[in-house]
Amino acid sequence: MTEPLTDSIQDYLKSIYELTEVGQLASTNALAERLRVKPASATGMMQRLASANPPLVKYRKHQGVMLTPAGKRAALEVIRHHRLIETWLVQTLGYSWDEVHNEAEKLEHVISEEFEERIASAMGYPSRDPHGEPIPSADLIMPKDQVIALTKIEPNQEACILRVHAQDADFLKYLEQLGLVIGARVKALEVSRYDQVMRIQLRGRKEAISLGPAITNRVFIEILK
């Protein structure tokens, strides 16, 4: 029997994809924390998804899970919905980038494929959402993203911010206050070899700012020179 893709299953598949983007297994504890459920509930869902027809995950006891091809397609479908909706809310309805995540979490499960195509077409088929995250294509292929973390920049290098990895509204507001928004140009002035605290200069701002790894590991850039 084919497993119906409920909202809960879609949330699990999306979370597994996001946790395993770097090729690691998604542990039960990591999923439980991310989805705010008990570890036993996460384990039960993993076993359920592993026994679905077709299987949506490969489950290894005490290690975690990886998505199967069917699970990955289902995850990319909901991620495409989510990121298109976020983009639409910003471009069409005037939402700010810190307001869209929770709205998209609700709407990603209910829009039709026709609605998805219409908003994508109306926006000119955007390749990135308001946070710079790549949007899977209509045939559910995730574009390759060549950005690197801001923490990798060297002194005197200049870069453009292309992506921030954040869902927390307060964190996004803080980044905006600092000027660390999509498209901003930054220059690294110095980097401490002891604690990785970085001093950067933003184009158009007189004062340099200091950033720790909690920020520089979540802001992604393209080196300009």
Image (cartoon, rainbow, N blue to C red):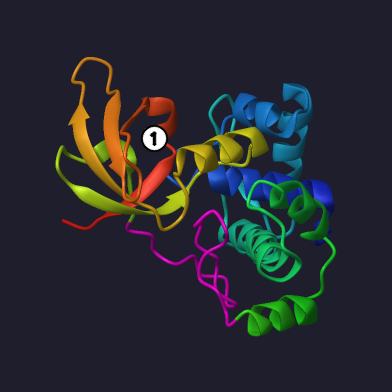
The quadrant of the rendering that contains the C terminus is: bottom left
Is 135 situated left or right of 120 in this image? Answer: left
Q: Position of residue 182 (x, y in %)?
A: 46, 55
Picture mark count = 1
Relative placement, left or right, of 99 versus 129 is right
Nearest to the observer: residue 119 or residue 46 = 119
Residue at image coords 57%, 71%: 140
Describe residue 158's horizontal placement relative to residue 4 as left or right: left
Residue 199's x, y, as percent?
27, 30
Query: Mark 1 Cα within 10 Å, few/some/many (few <14, many 20+)?
Result: some
Three-letter amino acid code of the residue under disc 1: Asn
Q: Most extreme residue toward the front, as rendered?
A: 206
Residue 66 placement: quadrant: top right
According to the picture, the residue beneath numbered tag 1 turns out to be: 217
At which x and y percent is residue 145?
Answer: 38, 60
Q: Residue at x 67, y 26 (%)?
A: 33
Quadrant, the N terminus = bottom right
Report the span colored magenta. 124-146
For residue 138, above or below residue 214 = below
Residue 139 lies, in percent from the top left, at: 57, 77
Residue at image x 64%, y 59%? 79
Q: Let me know if residue 219 appears in the view.
A: yes
